[in-house]
Every structure is written in structure tokens, then in C-alpha cells.
Image: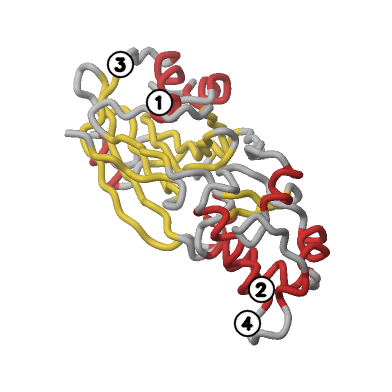
Amino acid sequence: MTKPVPTQNFSPQAATGDFAAAEGSLSRGDGNAVDGAVFRGDGIAAWRKIADLVEAEIIGGMLAPGTQLPTEAALAARFGVNRHTVRRALGELAGKGLVRTAQGRGTFVELSRLAYPIGERTRFSQNMAQEGREPGGIVLEAVEIEADPRLAGLLAITPGSPVLKLLTMRSADGVPIAFGNSFLPLPRFAGFADAYRRFGAVTPALAACGVDDYKRISTRVGARFASPDEAARLDIAAGRPVLTVEGVNIDADGVPIQAISSLFAADRTEIVVQS
């Protein structure tokens, strides 16, 4: 039987660029502004031309990572098409992992892919700081469960022992990077969820529970396509690839303290294995 613990809602603050600059940069690539006439009479679908144009400007660096695109209405007016056509073009770009649509906030150029080192001392906040990004972390859910045989083996505890299951979302500059579950043995880590809510990071939360240092002893990395729910959590298009990361951390005495199972947005992250 699970025991629910109060949760927080995830509401990332996306990185944004200059709206007017983004709108003004949408050009043929020769410095001339594009108007609706460009999209008529040559047999190529208007949505395809818009998608190709925006893709070229993203790849060429004219639309920087994190820049907010003009609204659908503004793009439709600029190109002389309806909003459905613009929406299809943006959907094509999202399907390629070039833009992301944040509900109620607009469409943004995807962040450049972050290098995420995994080694003996894997630290999310440190990895983000090294990339020049502001790390963030919030608790989505915290419950007490009983360890099944597999989880008990990872944590070196008896099957049926109480375990804290903590679902968290990690972000960089307010953009979702990864979410997943941490499993920590109870009662040793009874205060971990509250500490994580306070600090927004694993390392200080473990320190609050008396663990001053810890190491990663195993990591398993895989890949698959995101489910609709997973895509919604990560603000990516449904069906985009995600990286699966499972690992176990131990304390200074070699005692397993945390098993993790996380999903990373593959368009925003590359895993770097350190030896």
C-alpha cells in the first residue's frame, strides 16, 4: 500500500529570446524579407516552405537556442497563409527536435544539446553548471512503497522493506531535461523528500540525511521513443527519442543508498561516459 506525500506542480520557466528579433530574422537567407507571394504557384506546399525556411535559420544560427518564435497568428500574417498551415510547419519542426511548444507560452527553438557526463561522481547540478546552465529540480510525487525482489537486490535490503519512491523533474534554464524515480531505503532517508523540496538537488538532500559523499557504482543507458505522457512532461513532440538511465549510488561505506530510473530528452542531452 502506498502512502502519498504532498506534491508540487511542475511549471518550468522557459528561456526566451527577443521576439522582434526572431520575427525579423525569418528571411530567405539573402537578407530579403519573405512575403506571402513566395509561397504561391510553384507546386511546393506552403507549410513545407515555412518549415524549411525556419529550419535553415535555426541551423544557420540566425534563430538562437531558446529563442521564442513569433505567434502562429504573426507567422500566418507574415507568410500570407492560415494558422493551420503554420501549425503544420511548426509540427514538422517539433518532430525533428528543432523547436518545442510549451502550452500557454509559445514555441521556442530547442536548446543546444548538453553534454551530460556519467561517472563515479555523477552530479546533475554540477553537470548543468559546467555547461553554463541554471539547474533546477522539483518533486512531482513522493510515496512509500515495499521493495520488490529486484529493487531489494539493488539496494541490498530485504524484499518487502519500506522504500521512499521519489519522482522528480530536472531542468536547465527552466527547460525540462530529465525526469524519473529515485528509490531510497527507509527509515534512513525519511527526510529526503522534504530536503529535496528545500534544495532542489540530490547532493544537499542526501547531506541533510547524513550522507556527505556518495559514488555511482553502476549505470545502464538505453534509448526508446517517448510515450505521449512522457513527451508532455519533457515538453517534446510525441514519439521523439528519450535516453533511459538506471543507476545505483553508494555511500562512503559502500552501502547502497539510492537506485535511480530516469528519462532524458535525447534532443537536449548527450550522455558522456567517463572512465
- Of the numbered discs 1 and 4, the one sitting upstream in the chain is 4
Q: Position of residue 83 (x, y in %)?
A: 78, 69
Callout 1 touching callout 4 (CB < 8 Å)? no
**CA–CA distance between discs 3 and 2?**
53 Å
- Of the numbered discs 4 and 3, the one sitting upstream in the chain is 4
Please tell me whether residue 91 is drawn above or below residue 149 in the rendered image. Answer: below
Q: Nearer the viewer, mark 2 or mark 4?
A: 4
Q: Nearer the viewer, mark 3 or mark 1?
A: 1
- Of the numbered discs 3 and 2, the one sitting upstream in the chain is 2
Q: Nearer the viewer, mark 3 or mark 2?
A: 2
Badge 2 amino acid: Trp
Crowd rating for badge 4 (residues with CA inside 10 Å; few <14, some 14–19, many 20+): few
Query: For numbered disc 3, what is the local secondary structure?
Result: loop
Q: Residue at x 64, y 39 (%)?
A: 14
Closer to the camera in the image, 54 or 68: 54
Please tell me whether residue 111 is drawn above or below residue 97 in the rendered image. Answer: above
Badge 4 amino acid: Ile
- Pick out the residue farthest to the left: 275
Closer to the camera in the image, 202 or 166: 202
Residue of label 2? 47
